[in-house]
Amino acid sequence: MQQERPFDLLNKMIGQKILIRLKNGIDIRGQMVSFDIHMNIVMDNAEELDGSELKAKLGTILLRGGNILFISPV
Amino acid sequence: MQQERPFDLLNKMIGQKILIRLKNGIDIRGQMVSFDIHMNIVMDNAEELDGSELKAKLGTILLRGGNILFISPV
Amino acid sequence: MQQERPFDLLNKMIGQKILIRLKNGIDIRGQMVSFDIHMNIVMDNAEELDGSELKAKLGTILLRGGNILFISPV
Amino acid sequence: MQQERPFDLLNKMIGQKILIRLKNGIDIRGQMVSFDIHMNIVMDNAEELDGSELKAKLGTILLRGGNILFISPV
Amino acid sequence: MQQERPFDLLNKMIGQKILIRLKNGIDIRGQMVSFDIHMNIVMDNAEELDGSELKAKLGTILLRGGNILFISPV
Amino acid sequence: MQQERPFDLLNKMIGQKILIRLKNGIDIRGQMVSFDIHMNIVMDNAEELDGSELKAKLGTILLRGGNILFISPV
Amino acid sequence: MQQERPFDLLNKMIGQKILIRLKNGIDIRGQMVSFDIHMNIVMDNAEELDGSELKAKLGTILLRGGNILFISPV
C-alpha cells in the first residue's frame, strides 16, 4: 500500500518552508500557504534564488503549477 | 485546514495593484480588475517592466492565464 | 464582486480597434469582429506591427487564441 | 450581437483562396476545401511561401490546426 | 456543404503513398495503413527524407499525431 | 476497411524488439513489454542509441508516451 | 495478454531505488515513495546527477509527471 501520495505530501507541507524548482531552472524558496488541484501554490515570504544566493524578494506569490519541476520541504 | 487557497488570493487582489511575472521573463504591473477560471486576468493601467524600469504603458489588458509564471500583490 | 470579467471585456471590444500581443512578440492591430470560447479572434483591417511601425497589412484574419499573450483596446 | 463568429468565417472561406500563417513563421496559400472542430484544414493547390516567393508546391494537404497562427482570405 | 472533411481525406489515403511533414521540419514518406482519432498514423515502407533525398529507411512505423504539421497524398 | 489500427500494431509488438524515436532525436531500442492508452511504454533491455552506436544501457524503463515521435518494430 | 502494464511497474517500484530521466536531460535518483495518476512522483533521498556524478542532494521531492522522459528501477 502506498504511503503519503503526492497530494498528501503537499498537504503536510502547508505552513512549512519549501523550495520549488521551476522548469526554467529558477529556484523559489518560501513558506507554503495553500495549493489547489492544478498544483497552483500560494507562498509567503517567497525569494528567488540564483543557486544558493538570494536574487530577489518576491513576498506573497501565487505560482501556477504548470511551471513546476519539483517541490521539496527545506 | 488550508487558508486562502490560490483562487481566494486572486479574489482578494481585485482592485489592488499586482505584479505578474510571465513565463518569458517579462513583468507586467497594474491594477487587477477581474479573473476567470483559466486565470485570464483583466488589468487596468498595466505597465510592462524591464527589471524595475518602465518599458511601455499598456493601459487596460486582458492577459491569457497560460502565460503566467506567478502573480504577486505589490 | 467582480466587474467586467475577461470575456465581458472581450464582448465590449467588439467593433472597436484592438491590439493583440502574440506569444512570439509580434503585435497585431485591427478592428475586432468576433471571438469564441477558445479566444479565437476575427479581426478586420489587421496590421502586423514591428514595434510601432507597420510591417504588413493582413486584412481580415482569424487568429487562434492559443497564440495570444494579451489583448488591449487602443 | 456578434456577427460572423470565428467558425462562421471558416465556413465562408470554403472554396476560396486562403493564406495560413503557421506558428513557425511559414505561410501556406491555397484553396480551402474543408475544416473540422480542431481547425484541421484541407487545402487544394497548396503552396509554401517564403515571404511572397513560392518555395514549394504541396498540392492537396491536410494541415493540423494546432500549427496555425492565423488564417486569412486572399 | 463541405466535401471531404479532414478525416474523410485521411480515410481516402489508406493504402496510398503519402508524405508527412513533421513539426521539426523532417519529411516522412510511405504507404498509409491506418489512423486513429488522435491522427496517430501507421505507415509501411516509411522513409525519412532530407529535402528530396532519402536519409533513412524506417520500415513500418506508428507515428504520433501530435508531431504532424501536414499530411499530403503523393 | 482499415487494417491494423495504431493500437493494434502496438499490441502486435508486445514481446518484440522495437525502436522508439523520441521528439528530442534520441533513439531507444529494446523489447516491448506493455503499453497503456497514453502510449506510455514499458521496455526491457532498453538501450539508448546515438545514430547506430550504443550510448547507454538503460535496462527496464517506463517511457512516457508524450515524448515519442514514432515507434517501429525492428 | 499484456503483463506488467506501465502503472503496474510503477506500483512495483514503490520502496525501490529508481532513476528518473527528465525531458531537460537531467537525471534524478532516489527511493520511490508514491505516485498518482498524472505520474507525479514522491521520492526520498533524491539526488540530482550530472552524468554519473552527484550534482546536488535534494532530499524528499514531489516531481511533476509532465517533466519525465522515463523512469527506471536501479
Image: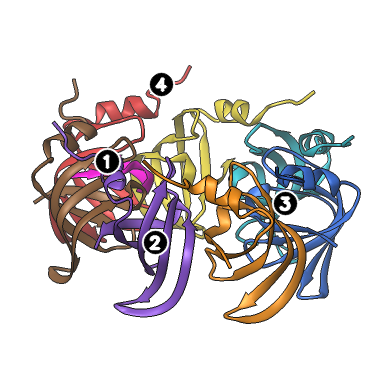
Chain colours: A cyan, B yellow, C red, D brown, E purple, F orange, G blue
Residue at the spot of label 3: A70
Label 4 chain ID:
C
Of the residues shown, which amino acid type is indicated by label 4? Gln
Q: Residue at x 18, y 31 (%)?
A: D8
Taking depth in this image into account, of D68 and C15 the one nearest to the observer is: D68
Nearest to N terminus: mark 1 or mark 2: 1
Label 3 chain ID:
A
Same-chain check, marks 3 and 1: no
Q: Is residue E43 above or below residue B44?
A: below
Element at badge 3? strand
Element at badge 4? loop
Instruction: Please tell me how crowded label 1 is: few (under 14), some (14-19), or many (20+) other residues with Cα within 10 Å.
Output: few
The Cα–Cα distance between marks 4 and 3, rounded to whole angstroms, is 36 Å
Counting from the top left corner in percent of width and height, residue B68 is at 51, 46
Single out the mark in the foreground, 1 or 2: 1
Counting from the top left corner in percent of width and height, residue G46 is at 85, 58
Relative placement, left or right, of A42 versus F20 is right
Of the residues shown, which amino acid type is indicated by label 2? Lys
Single out the mark in the foreground, 3 or 2: 2
Residue at the spot of label 1: E8
Same-chain check, marks 1 and 2: yes
Of the residues shown, which amino acid type is indicated by label 3? Phe
Single out the mark in the foreground, 4 or 2: 2
In the image, the segment drawn in magenta is C61-74
